[in-house]
Image (cartoon, rainbow, N blue to C red):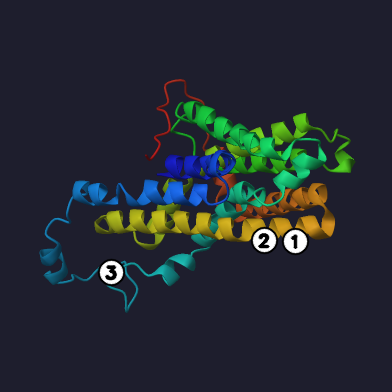
Amino acid sequence: MEVLTGLGMMLGPLLGTVLYQLGGYACPFYVFTVVVVVPTPFIIRLLPSAPNASSVLSSPITSNPLLMPGHSESSLSVFRILKNHRVSMTIVYLILCILGTSYLLPVLTIHLQNLGVAKKNVGYFFIIPTLAYSLNMLLIARLPKNIDRHVYLHLGGLVMVLAFLLLGPEEALHLPHSIYTTCVGLFLIGVGCSIVMVPSIPVLIGHITLCYPDPEDKNRVSDMASAFFQTSIYISGFIGPNCASLLTEGLGFSRGCTVISLLLFSYQILFFVFVDGMKAFRTIKHRTDANPLQMSL
């Protein structure tokens, strides 16, 4: 699910641009509506029904000493889970990392036009992060499974920090303001986003399990982790364009990207300190026979 979600986020701007060029403003909305609505009845028929739903609802609830008073095994408490700083800090970290994909939507066109790119060709630059995301999936599938997934979260975050520094780039870096520098930044956004997304749900599952360690809650813990993952994507998709507009209007594109980069790096330090960062890097084992990291599709 993480892979397909990220791929959809990367392909959206590209397909939207192509459809806009072919049929005008309304064309992307018509096409995506048809693509979503038409297969829905067939998908509903293919989905399996919930087994023994009535028996599950009518079965008595057994007591569990691991649960806090007032909580039942029939549901998980969102507030109790969010009180765990590992869960809440991981969600914020995901929001900041995924922010890059939505941040560029309202401002990248203007930046590329200032670099001399024709307006009709701007959308094709979104091919770069999409291609980077897809190619990096082949490498992520080969990553060793015995390495703590927090390491991959930090690695992806550092790539995103570097990507935003190159998108501008900031004058203090003495890098040229050119299309080539911007393309490298776009490529790194695709790479960083893919590295962050793949281990995100397993990391959330591990943290939520600390609140609900009962094996009987395994499926509900997995569902809750998936819900938090999707929520972080929706929040980043909402605040990304707004942050881009405000920062670009007040500071300019280059400095706005630098602010996002510094914000992500500063929070990454906090995330490293308070969410088992040292423990994760200490448990790295260099084994040539390690199994690849499994991806959730």
Classify residue 77 as left or right of residue 113. left
Say few, some or many: other residues with alpha carbon within 10 Å of mark 3 (under 14 / 14 to 19 / 20 or more).
Answer: few
Rendered image quadrant of residue 184 = top right
Dot 2 corresponds to which residue? 242
Q: Give the mark toward the camera: 3 or 1.
A: 1
Residue 65: mark: 3
Residue type at the position of mark 3: Pro
Looking at the image, residue 235 sits to the left or right of residue 210; the answer is right
Quadrant of the image containing the C terminus: top left
Outermost front residue: 23
Residue 70: quadrant of the picture: bottom left
Answer few, some or many: residues within 10 Å of disc 2's Cα (few below 14, many 20 plus, some between 14 and 19).
Answer: some
* Foreground residue among 191 and 215: 191
Residue sticking out furthest to the top: 288
Q: Which residue is drawn at 67% across and 61% down?
A: 242
**Which is nearer the eye, 127 or 95?**
127
Tell me whether circle 2 and circle 1 mark residues in contact (CB < 8 Å). Answer: yes
The image position of residue 249, as x and y in percent, is 80, 59
Residue 143 can be seen, yes or no: no
Question: Number of labelled discs?
Answer: 3
- Under mark 2, the amino acid is Asn
Residue type, numbered disc 1: Leu
User: Gap in Å between the C-alphas at discs 2 and 1?
Assistant: 6 Å
Q: How crowded is mark 1: few (under 14 residues within 10 Å), some or many (20 or more)?
A: few
Identify the disc placed on residue 16. none
Q: Who comes first in sequence, dot 3 or dot 1?
A: 3
Which residue bears the numbered disc 1? 246
Residue 62 in picture, x, y percent from top left: 18, 70
**58 relative to 47, above or below:** below
Secondary-structure class at tag 1: helix
